[in-house]
Image (spheres, coloured by chain):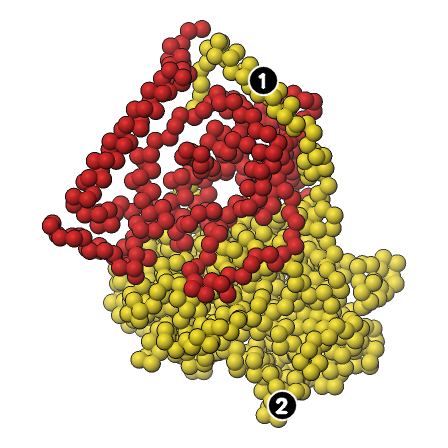
Chain colours: A yellow, B red
Amino acid sequence: MSYILDRREFVKMSALAAASAMAASRAGIASLPPAEAAHPGRAITWDKAPCRFCGTGCHVQVGVRDGKVVAIQGDPLADVNKGLLCAKGYHVGMALYGRDRLQHPMLRRNGTLKQISWQEAIDMIAHRVLEAPERFAIYGSGQWTIPEGYAAQKLMKGGLSNNHIDPNARLCMASAVTGFLSVYGVDEPAGCYEDLDRCDVLILWGNNMAEMHPVLFSRVVDRRSRGEQVTIIDLGTRRTRSTEQAQHFLEFKPHTDLAIANGIAHLLIRRGTFDKNFVENHCHFRQDTEEASLMGRPMSFEQYIQAVERYTPEYVEEVSGVKASDIRMLADFFGRKDVRITSTWCMGMNQHSRGTNINRLVHGIHLLSGHFGRPGDAPTSLTGQPSACGTAREVGTLAHALPGGRLVAKEDHRAQCEELWNLPAGRINPKPGYHTVLMWEKFCTPTSEGGDISTLLVQVTNPGQSLPNLHKLFRGKQGLEDKFLVVSDVYPTASTALADLILPAAMWVEKNGIFGNSERRTQQWFKMVQPPGEARDDTWMTIAIARRLYELGHPGMKDKNGGFLFSFPDDQGNEVPIWEWEHYYDMNVDRALYEEYRPFTFLKHKNVAPYDVLARHRGLRWPVVELPEGGWRETKFRFSGFDDPFVENGREFDFYHSVTGDGRAQIWFAPYESPPEVPDSEYPFWLCTGRVLEHWHTGTMTMRVPPLRGSMPHSYVEMHPEDAASQGIQNGEMIRLITRRGSVDLPVWIGGRGHPPRGSLFVPFFDQRLLVNLVTLDAVDPISKEPDYKKCAARVDKTSIATQARKETPTPL
Amino acid sequence: MKNSDSNDLYRPHKKGTGIVVAVIFTVSASGFFMGLQQTLSTISLTREVQETPFVNETQTPALKTAESGTVPQAVGYAEMVHARHLKANGFWQQSLEKFSEPPEELLAVVLPSLGEKQEEMKQRLQIRAFDGAPPRIPHPMDQITDASCLSCHEKGMKMKDRYVPAMSHGTLANCTQCHVPMEGPPSKEAGVLKQPLDINDWEGIQSVVQGERAFPDAPPQIPHAVRMRSNCLSCHGPRSEPALRTTHPFRQNCLQCHLPSAELDRRGLLPGGL
């Protein structure tokens, strides 16, 4: 609106404005307190860091004043989030200041915790390890920084010849890893977030992106505000906020996504709308062996056609409940060459007892239809943890892996690591260690009954809440006198509740760090504030334990020349005693470890950028190569000739780590198979678990952030109103949720954040007082060993809640 | 310069009263007749509901319409939660279009005292963790969709002495990504499950009451970042809390006199720099 004023009006208004301004200045505004009022921002220093929470990898600007984080802004120069954050990201600084931060090492003796010194704590762990090195295990995390994971990896596999190290990422994206490996021969997505800016169709495979990866979801839906068209198809088992933004909601019965993917393949083949050129030049067909295996066996195109033959739209409708016409719609899109299709998925496809297979199939339909490798055409897995890709996958902190995409089972891979680590040949144990579920099962089983893990060190994660079937896999530890649980964390958690030794850790910008996000982006940040009390870096803990073992004479702590495994010189060439906390920051240990790790990444062409280059950028996507004219170049689209420097010149696509060794990707067939547990008359409901926007992982950080906790103060069970009505259950009422493994009491939320269909329940897992994982199933995918948290059979009981049970105050958080 | 149109526009004292009276009359008269109509046929619950244009499909169960001469059947409690039109802001499309706002008071004298300004800043902190944090939603809302947010917050509104701020930034489609409600799920065990929020020692930067001036009558500098606050009128316009309101809403080009701070905006960050 613009105003046209005549002169008289203008003079009148100006006079008025001037008068009010003068009146205002007389009203005492000039005498405002100085300091912040007069000099906003002057005392604040700002620095960049990736957000602490999810795998999106947004960058924030962290404002620090007087040694404390006081402000957070979205980083406008960050390519991932372009200045935008989500509710968690804006409040990430508050996660440091929960009142009950752990500040001192604590030892549990006769049931009570007693403060001890760091020296005692490290000594105790070292002695237990020395007693039985093969019974020691480390349970790590996709929240480990790259140097933290790398140090733990080197200590275990290179030092102790022990492969019992696995990260919580096993519970989160192991199926995505096995999917990528079996399809492309090498892990991690080929595309990047730019696909979200360029796609015409976005398919959410059981993925509530609006709440779980909101910044990425906004990258898509905000395109509509700019007048762009993008079709969102939500394939889900319940209505969510993502559904609200989608044009199509295809509700399927749990586990039947395999049938849907096969239905699309069936139509592409039958109609001849698959990309013949792409398939002929760049693909092979493959299927599983009798017993599930990572690489399976080849099949011919004719066999593939036969295999998908039975997945007619009508058959798929019968199995999945998705209308045949909707299956045809999906196939129509995939059959078109003039649209670009991006598929995203996260836990829905990964936490699946056929997780590897559904990952293979979704890659398969993208390859079959040629919707691959052009900006906007991509099958993209999203990760939930900030460095699941960087630390768990790239550093290979899994029981079967070695850094840089190597495997412990491969002799040449072991030899390469021994050489890079300067270790005597044969140091690395060729037998894979225990994966997560097995590791905890062994730890919770009495030693006399074969439970051969006796000391377990947990870093940067909370298995006491996030493991499935907690009765069996975590609480079973209670009463086993010879088992010793060490937990390093920042707050008291469900895990520290059973820990024998608690180590207080520094977090996020209280330490240097490097994360790797979902789109292959490696991100670095510097320490900005001091940790509280005696809290220390997890990398330091690992190195201090190694040093103590070295002093106690463990031969594995020495390299080929007798030097300490973690020996780093300063600029003058003198070894810095980084195992002493007072000297830990005399040098940049992160930089030293990362530069030692970097050569490991070259084998699988995952070349990460040098530390000093990362320090100047808001993350760079590997492979990062040095340009002949100087400078470094990142890669957005892997395997695509126009962008990937490792693709042979002149080729449009080159899968240069192909399973078949000929530059081709594998299109897999996998059948629909029934889930391990299905509802029956005794347990008539499907139970699905998941997350909410406000809380991250097990809520140990976000539940201590008042705005987030105020918005979502406790967990709940979502239920269809008719199911509730049939049992006389009211909104907000406490009910007992029962499965074959146990029970948990929860308030019912009807018509809330998500709307499940009849016969289906949903419970978020963030609330440690209402532990839904006491009742979830521990069935795992046969290849990835990832548990299926998304489906088991349950019933709800309104009457069985004794008043007594409800009066028991839940564990205070 | 003589311009009769503009004279008409800016003679609120004479015409304004007339308009206000006319508006009040129209609203009350139509309200009366609409009310009559409702009681005669069915209550509003049974009226056909117009769905939001943002949502393709809905799961609103078919509502039973009363036959003439009978009492309309009430919606069951279980159905209510699924009946979108019964939820918070459910009627936004119909009712707000009819709502008539008083004219903008472009010439109102705005002279808040320091105390009033400080009080307003305190109010703002109730729903913000620190200066620059997205405000939380201080009213009930539909948990699954934010389709109705724009109906009030796109342009902002004023109802008597209540102000609905306009969005301070351009349209971003996923409102609840940053703005979270202040209330969680309902629970009969709320006493146990909703524990006090006094659990954190965070001390974030606070909003500044007044920007720095070079000399007493100089225009104050903008004392906060302008990122995500590009629409100055959201907080300082005629439809904002009086304590924050500009004395001269008729001036359109705010940044002509009030300068943003490169430091606060984190400008001067070069690509590849820190």
Is A107 above or below relative to B29? Answer: below
Q: Nearer the viewer, mark 2 or mark 1?
A: 1
The one of A330 and A553 positioned closer to us in this rendering: A553
Element type at marker 2?
Answer: helix
At label 2, counting other C-alpha atoms closer than 10 Å, the crowd grade (few under 14, some 14-19, many 20 or more) is: some
Q: Position of residue B227 (x, y in %)?
A: 57, 38
Q: In the image, what residue occupies the spot 58% across and 23% down?
A: B256
Name the residue type under label 1: Ala
Name the residue type under label 2: Thr
- Does the rendering let one see residue A393? no
Q: Position of residue A281 (x, y in %)?
A: 44, 61
The one of A81 and A615 positioned closer to us in this rendering: A81
Q: Is residue A3 left or right of residue A517?
A: left
Q: CA distance from mark 2 to mark 1?
A: 85 Å
**Badge 2 is on which residue?**
A447
Q: Is residue A17 left or right of residue A124?
A: left
